[in-house]
Image (tube, rainbow, N blue to C red):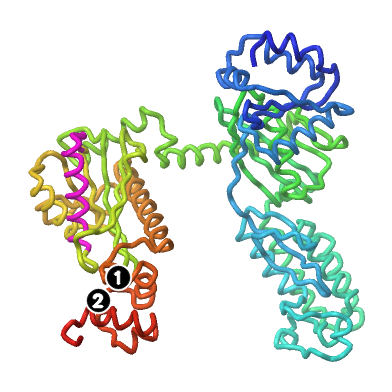
């Protein structure tokens, strides 16, 4: 949208009121959602001033239509903006990366609810508590719950009618003391719900109410001289207290508090969020945020809190943060600590954010697409040095064979240029000249086909060729290179599948690169990519039944029948060994006779 059009047709229609605005492209795609205290002033700022931020300038050039919604106040605009961003995920809004699946504790919506861990949230009316970022910790807690609170684990339909009819009998869990036997009416639903309430408290980190109740019951049994029952409760109390002592107790003065910090590095931001209950950190989560325009740290942190707080079902009424931020709730107390326990909490949060930042950068370095051009150049130079290559490996190709249980032979080749995948140069191959499964011959065929084609088209050859499979397949590939007269034109090495050793032609012992060195990381990345590309192609070919094989050369036998035979017998070799009767049971009498007589012409 050009400036003149905006000033002549739109600016006068914009209200001086709080609300949200939406920018759309010419193809009606939502580009950006924003909020404003004054819609006219905020939207006009996009079109009347020069933008130093390149992304903002590009956004403005793409805007074709503007929509806005007036809200009662700025806080309502904040809520609406967040909900729209979460729902539509516009490309120019903050992008929050959180692709991990964490477990929840689910309390099933049923009579005498079961309680267990799950990673899948289903909208079935059940109660889901979590998510829990420490899987080991929550599993330990679930084990403690099982030992301290009797619960059923069966899937019986324990309706009052079924129990009254005596439809069920107690199982071994009842005799072991792990279940109180509600299936036979030994425990009422009210008593069972009391146990569920205890579990709900434990899972949310509130151990004190449960411990106090157990202590009261223990003292009551002691007063009634029921020492065995008191001893059993004492053991449960000890178990819970040991678990409590393991958790990070920060301060008994901190009741329910959320803590958040952010580290911003250019267009990247790293947020750490902690939920503190009864002086203990019960949840901690770090996330990565990609800044799309010129959002401030306060805006990014506010968006992260709006995402994380409902995710972890926090009920705290205080945020400990490094600076003022907007929140979804109006009754939240914001604390910016200078000293004391809350400052220690904030420092701990920053420490976790810094660790997460370093970890994220390390992982990014392992993904070649996230490396800078300088990083990739250094990695290729290291590979040139480690493999003692005669030329800088700007162009690398890697081959791999693929077959399924001795049938459907195919192959794949991936190409990396300047250290990144060149997907337009990827190739997959149907094996044409090899009968049956012969990995060596198949490798020789595809290498010859690839470089014969490059020679005919006068295309540049790679400096490095990696043969995935070791000595045997390396030898087969070299034979094809020699037949094409390309010996010495490129360096060819074999990669052992398990040991990740590099084989050179004629060398007895392989080269073992440093395990976490840059060269081996690049080779692994290339190998993983050729595996992915080959397996995907192989799966597609199998599912579509497009494999060309010897069976389809039989007059009267089509692709569908050939696929049925291969799926049943796995290879052409086995099909040749089948009797006429066995083939008849698979594809019918008429087609079976055609196939059998094709492979056994002497018996016609």
Picture quadrant of residue 471: bottom left
**Quarter the C terminus occupies:** bottom left
Characterize the magenta stretch by its predominant secondary structure: helix
Please say whether residue 598 is visible from this viewpoint.
Answer: yes
Percent x, y for residue 203? 75, 60
Picture quadrant of residue 564: bottom left
- Mark before the other along the chain sequence, 2 or 1: 1
Percent x, y for residue 357? 54, 37
Relative height, residue 167 to residue 194 (above, below): below
Picture quadrant of residue 596: bottom left
- Classed neighbour count for the residue bearing mark 2: other residues with Cα under 10 Å, few (<14), some (14–19), many (≥20): some
Viewed as shown, does residue 476 lie left or right of 341? Answer: left
Q: Nearer the viewer, residue 482 or 584?
A: 584
> Tag 2, which secondary structure?
helix
Q: Nearer the viewer, residue 290 or 362?
A: 290
Q: Which residue is mark 1?
A: 406
Q: Which mark is residue 573?
A: 2
**Quarter the N terminus occupies:** top right
The span shown in magenta is 439-461
Viewed as shown, does residue 529 lie left or right of 135? Answer: left
Residue at screen point 32% across, 72% down: 557
C-alpha separation, residue under disc 2 versus residue under disc 1: 10 Å
Relative height, residue 379 to residue 311 (above, below): above
Please say whether residue 228 is visible from this viewpoint.
Answer: no
Residue at screen point 22% across, 45% down: 465
Relative height, residue 146 to residue 528 (above, below): below
Q: How many numbered discs sit on the rendered protein?
A: 2
**Residue 454 highlighted magenta (yes or no):** yes
Residue at screen point 68% across, 8% down: 4
Percent x, y for residue 595? 28, 78
| Label 2–label 1 contact, CB within 8 A | yes
- Classed neighbour count for the residue bearing mark 1: other residues with Cα under 10 Å, few (<14), some (14–19), many (≥20): some
């Amino acid at each position: 949208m050009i400036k003149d059009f905006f000033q002549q047709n739109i600016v006068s229609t914009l209200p001086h009121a709080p609300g949200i605005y939406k920018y759309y492209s010419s193809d009606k795609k939502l580009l950006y959602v924003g909020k404003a205290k004054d819609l006219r002033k905020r939207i006009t700022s996009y079109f009347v001033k020069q933008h130093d931020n390149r992304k903002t300038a590009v956004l403005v050039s793409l805007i074709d239509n503007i929509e806005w919604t007036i809200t009662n106040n700025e806080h309502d605009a904040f809520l609406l903006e967040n909900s729209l961003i979460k729902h539509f995920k516009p490309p120019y809004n903050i992008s929050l990366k959180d692709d991990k699946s964490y477990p929840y504790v689910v309390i099933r919506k049923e009579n005498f609810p079961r309680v267990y861990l799950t990673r899948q949230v289903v909208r079935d009316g059940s109660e889901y508590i979590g998510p829990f970022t420490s899987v080991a910790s929550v599993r330990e807690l679930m084990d403690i719950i099982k030992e301290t609170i009797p619960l059923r684990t069966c899937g019986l339909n324990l309706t009052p009618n079924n129990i009254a009819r005596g439809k069920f009998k107690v199982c071994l869990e009842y005799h072991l003391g792990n279940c109180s036997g509600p299936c036979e009416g030994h425990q009422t639903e009210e008593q069972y719900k009391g146990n569920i309430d205890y579990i709900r408290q434990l899972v949310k980190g509130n151990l004190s109410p449960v411990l106090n109740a157990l202590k009261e019951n223990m003292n009551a049994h002691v007063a009634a001289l029921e020492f065995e029952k008191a001893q059993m409760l004492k053991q449960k109390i000890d178990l819970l207290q040991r678990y409590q002592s393991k958790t990070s107790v920060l301060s008994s003065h901190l009741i329910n508090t959320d803590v958040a910090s952010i580290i911003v590095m250019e267009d990247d931001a790293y947020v750490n969020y902690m939920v503190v209950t009864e002086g203990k950190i019960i949840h901690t989560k770090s996330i990565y945020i990609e800044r799309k325009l010129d959002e401030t740290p306060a805006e990014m942190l506010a968006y992260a809190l709006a995402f994380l707080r409902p995710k972890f079902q926090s009920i705290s009424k205080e945020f400990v943060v490094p600076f003022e931020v907007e929140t979804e709730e109006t009754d939240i107390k914001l604390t910016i600590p200078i000293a004391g326990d809350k400052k220690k909490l904030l420092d701990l949060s920053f420490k976790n954010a810094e660790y997460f930042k370093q970890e994220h950068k390390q992982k990014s370095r392992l993904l070649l697409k996230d490396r800078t051009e300088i990083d990739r150049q250094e990695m290729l130079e290291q590979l040139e040095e480690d493999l003692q290559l005669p030329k800088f490996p700007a162009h690398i190709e890697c081959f791999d064979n693929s077959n399924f249980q001795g049938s459907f032979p195919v192959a794949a080749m991936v190409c990396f240029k300047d250290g990144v995948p060149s997907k337009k140069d990827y190739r997959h191959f149907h094996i044409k000249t090899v009968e049956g499964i012969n990995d060596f011959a198949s490798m020789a065929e595809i290498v010859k086909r690839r470089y014969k084609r490059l020679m005919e088209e006068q295309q540049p050859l790679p400096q490095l060729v990696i043969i995935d499979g070791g000595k045997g397949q390396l030898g087969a590939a070299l034979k094809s290179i020699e037949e094409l007269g390309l010996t010495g034109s490129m360096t060819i090495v074999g990669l052992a599948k398990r040991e990740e050793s590099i084989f050179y032609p004629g060398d007895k012992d392989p080269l073992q690169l440093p395990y976490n060195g840059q060269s081996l990381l690049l080779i692994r990345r290339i190998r993983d990519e050729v595996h992915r590309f080959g397996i995907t192609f192989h799966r597609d070919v199998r599912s579509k039944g497009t494999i060309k094989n010897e069976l389809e050369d039989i007059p009267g036998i089509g692709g569908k029948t050939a696929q049925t035979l291969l799926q049943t017998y796995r290879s052409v070799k086995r099909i040749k060994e089948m009797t006429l009767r066995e083939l008849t049971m698979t594809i019918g009498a008429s087609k079976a006779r055609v196939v059998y007589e094709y492979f056994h012409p002497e018996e016609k």
